[in-house]
Image: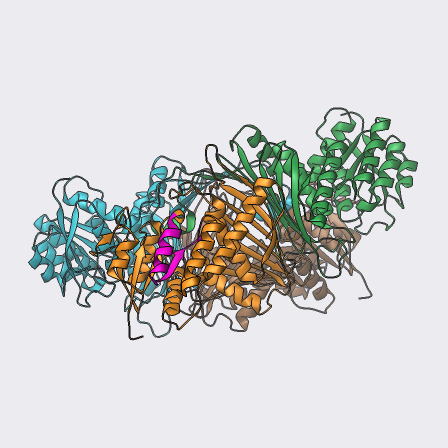
Chain colours: A brown, B cyan, C orange, D green
């Protein structure tokens, strides 16, 4: 890798500071331009001047840029970069509604500029392991994908709902890990007193091949969990994306244990294996993939089209909750 | 308690053997008549003659009777006991469909005979604690009831689906613990290759007061769990009915921990308390309540009407899954 | 197995009731004689007459007998059975001191009568798995055996110390599972205010091959644990004898995870496997082994000599604690 | 705090990089001088020149200094700072043997210069909570302190044993949290093939008030644990210093649960509470305490005398292991 990519970063908040840290350590990339209307609250600039907006980055001149401004501002920033021909990675979710997401997709597509979206969970080493093993048939036929993404209310949340902010992770993961599209969803939502958007959603869905999905997503829970449980004819994968753990529970041989144990542990149990594998930081893997795509030597990014699809499914969940009906996707 | 109740037991299978064990140890009750067309596979009769059917019990003469035959046979056995004026506890679920359940209810109601249903989870000490604390407002406003009842395929299962066999536990628990009726359900089901009935169901529902419910019930999982998670404005209860544990997770005060911990454990945490309380065996508490109701000194049984209601909700889940729509209850 | 062994049982307390239950279900054995000076508190006789002492059993006439009277009474009961030529299984510990244990050994040895001791943990399926895998070298060279046997104060305890009552389990397990004798021990003990015997012991020991042992045994802890952790060059076995679980933690390949995970989980991790295997009740396996030894078709009992050795090591622990020195065995 | 302390840092390895990060963010302190013979491997200097040794720091001129060079080099660096009158915090352990530790103590004492030692576990918020609650008598009389500090072999380890490197944590914690000195220790050690120093130690000890201690410390385990379990008349504290969790297990009221649960969970259980409290990073709290001591507004540092005491106890453990005897302290 002889040339070094000149990179920009717009948005220096909670996620932006992590992008800055990782970009600063990424071989083949130099972070040369940073911008945020709020300045540099986490002190990541390290002496570099901090502009107020994307124009600062364009003025300095970059090969590629990461956009980690609040979701409501994704569209104008991303479109400006597309118009300037700058390869761009936009944080997830791509936009707050389908129309805005479509405009971003079109801005990049029509100009042939590389666009990507930061669905960072796809780079979680435990989910990558699960996807590979699923593809090799370790679970047999898949019956159910159940995800739980619950935790305390984060301070960073403004006027946005949990479906778009967090639920998009689960939608993206579910379709990507199974390689199956959701064909229908039934959702229920609720919110804290006084909040305009939903803070909790429960969803059941159906995949094209008949698999069942279930998603509990909220920021109203006192404990934090980030789990994906995949159950098939041969057993289950339990993926904990916080610890990046993948555990396989094999179906048991059906030997009956003594009564005192059967009460607690079921009539049969197979081996339970928590796999060992390398656990690089997902954000680094994501930015490596983006760098390689910019250089034309890789294609492992989450495309704008894929992220638009996720916004469509999230919108269907909100429709379902609002109308009290099951909604096709 | 001077008089001793003469009790009968029809059905000596997996549940019947436990009824026999508990009835044999219950003060104020004498188990005098046992019947099962398959005889006494678990050796619980202890020298007493074992009849083939309910007529044997009626011939011996009893004050009360427990019915733990396969669900498909509940109706004829229960109706025969109602006609004979025998106070009866029928195992759950009351029947395999609404029509049969209604006929059982009517048989007892019209004759003024005491009928009860063995929804034993209501007597689980951890759920009883949770219900009492919920009633006292410990969780504040309730946002969500999420239950998980998953485990390996049990040998005892014949041609019956998981919604009626296990899901009725979750429906009964949810409405009882919250004291709110479900007003709508959206369900998805799937089954093992070659099975006529569903083996897995995922449900989202709505309670009359707006609370959200979610239920994962199946016998296709390699690990066993029996969990009820209640989340409200003040925190969560996690009820594990296998170990009869109730754990309260309080919402946190919002103090930020150091980064390395926040990654795993969330931005805030409150106290977590697993309560200590007496843990009598639920089946014993259930049969004590039935005995007391027969004696007219208690009324803590699950009524036939309540169990019929549970069958209606279960039927709505099956309708929802079959039609792919949300179904009102 | 054409002939049926006539079996006796002396002692119908907490352990005796389990012996009765298992003997009653054991093919090839008929429990024909029961005795206890306190009668039949748990109702296990099922109509059989209950004598007051071992003479009742001898009068009825048996081929073999189980002795589960309080430890202080093991010697006279066992010796009476030896003198009558009855094959005997004595509950553990064999006796409260070395001298008594030696007399029991001699009583059986000199008459050529089969004696065995109920060190039931050896029949725990998880420990049996661990022993087999250790023998096949799965852990490589063994560095350390650490056991923890802690829990609340049991009601059954009279005036006996925790070293003889519970610690003998850990001594027996450690020497059996490693097939190495302990060569020295250093112990510290303490007791509840007002108790004559020790209620807590902490021991470090050394095995003949240089392996280190550590044992925490007490009935002063609010939580119950029964753990054996074996650590060698290739990883660790964690044996939970309550759930009969054996989990293997392999040494890791040394790949560095991202910082946030390394903080919690260490610099490397290998696969973690909880094995699936049949889990018959240990007491049943023990009594099957005793039956087979009586019939001359098996030899998998814990010998009196082995149990005497365990008493010697336990006595060395008590010496060490009393004198504040390290004691050779 | 009007004046800003000028701080130096000697040693920029694994611990040094954390000192640099925390010092850079500490109000009232400016890190002005850094030195390491190996340069700045973790890139923490941020443009500041990096000297080769302590003389560089003395040349620049500082009010205080942190020493995080390898333990074998603590003495010369610390003594040079003492001679220059620079308030100094030395990483733990203070030295590799008692004689060197005594010389460091004397260098600071004789000149009246502030010296402190980085026993960072004392600043772990969970241990601080435990100490406070212990002092208020929450556990009643203390029976036992058991610590476990096990994990995989760290790359940073050169030719030093686990007793001095890690065991000093457990010795310091035990005496500090109980406010009782250890009066005797019995230790056993072992090592990996080919290593000159011990890699595993098991210790039993006795506190002046009769409490028992037990310590398992090694870097030969495939899983990582950092636990302190304190057991007294009223229950136990379990302190996990990795997650900074403090859990209290109260003794139970003695109500008997149903058999199937008693098998797993013991004859009684009290409430179990995991407390919520602020969790600032321990290293930051340690350096705040050091800063305050330098400014004369606080005295919450670990003194050199206290750290020397810890070295003495560690040396006693090594003596015990070498001689196979119990050693008084």
Q: Nearer the viewer, residue C25 or A234?
A: C25
- Residue A112: image x %, image y %? 68, 66
- Residue B15: tell me if it is visible: no
Q: Nearer the viewer, residue B47 or B99?
A: B47
Instruction: Classify the position of the N terminus of chain B by image quarter.
Output: top left
A308 is higher (above) or lower (below) than B240: below
- Residue A189: image x %, image y %? 43, 49
> Which quarter of the figure has residue C212?
bottom right
- Residue C228: tell me if it is visible: yes
Which residue, as the protein is rendered here, is positioned at the far front?
Answer: C110
- Residue B130: image x %, image y %? 36, 42
> Which quarter of the figure has residue B27?
top left
Position of D95 with respect to C21 (left or right) is right
- Please provide the residue range marked out in magenta: C73-95
Mark count: 0
Magenta residue check for C88 = yes
B244 is higher (above) or lower (below) than B159: above
Position of A157 with respect to A63 (left or right) is left
Q: Residue at x 47, y 43 (%)?
A: C161
A2 is higher (above) or lower (below) than D263: below
- Residue C2: image x %, image y %? 29, 75
Q: Nearer the viewer, residue A20 or D85?
A: D85
Magenta residue check for A250 = no
Q: Nearer the viewer, residue D66 or C189?
A: C189
């Amino acid at each position: 890798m002889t040339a070094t990519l000149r990179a920009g970063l717009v948005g220096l908040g909670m996620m932006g500071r992590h992008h800055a840290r990782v970009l600063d350590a990424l071989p083949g990339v130099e972070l040369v331009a940073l911008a945020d209307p709020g300045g540099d609250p986490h002190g990541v600039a390290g002496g570099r001047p901090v502009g107020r907006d994307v124009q600062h980055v364009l003025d300095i001149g970059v090969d590629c840029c990461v956009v980690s401004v609040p979701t409501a501002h994704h569209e104008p920033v991303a479109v400006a970069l597309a118009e300037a021909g700058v390869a761009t990675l936009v944080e997830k979710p791509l936009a707050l509604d389908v129309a805005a997401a479509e405009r971003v997709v079109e801005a990049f597509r029509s100009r042939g500029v590389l666009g990507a979206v930061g669905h960072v969970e796809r780079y979680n080493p435990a989910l990558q392991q699960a996807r590979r093993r699923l593809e090799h048939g370790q679970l047999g036929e898949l019956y159910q994908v159940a995800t739980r993404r619950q935790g305390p209310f984060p301070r960073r949340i403004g006027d946005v709902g949990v479906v778009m902010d967090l639920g998009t992770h689960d939608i993206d993961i579910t379709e990507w890990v199974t390689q199956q599209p959701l064909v229908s969803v039934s959702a229920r939502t609720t919110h804290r007193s006084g909040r305009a958007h939903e803070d909790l959603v429960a969803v059941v869905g159906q995949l094209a091949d008949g698999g069942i999905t279930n998603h509990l997503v909220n920021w109203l829970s006192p404990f934090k969990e980030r789990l994906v449980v995949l159950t098939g004819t041969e057993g289950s994968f339990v993926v904990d994306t916080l610890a990046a753990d993948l555990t396989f529970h094999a179906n048991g041989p059906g030997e009956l244990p003594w009564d005192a144990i059967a009460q607690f542990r079921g009539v049969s149990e197979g081996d339970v294996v928590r796999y060992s594998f390398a656990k690089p930081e997902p954000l680094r893997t994501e930015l490596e993939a983006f760098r390689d795509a910019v250089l034309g030597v890789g294609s492992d990014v989450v495309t704008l089209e894929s992220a638009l699809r996720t916004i469509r499914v999230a919108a269907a969940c909100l429709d379902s909750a609002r109308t009290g009906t099951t909604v096709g996707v």
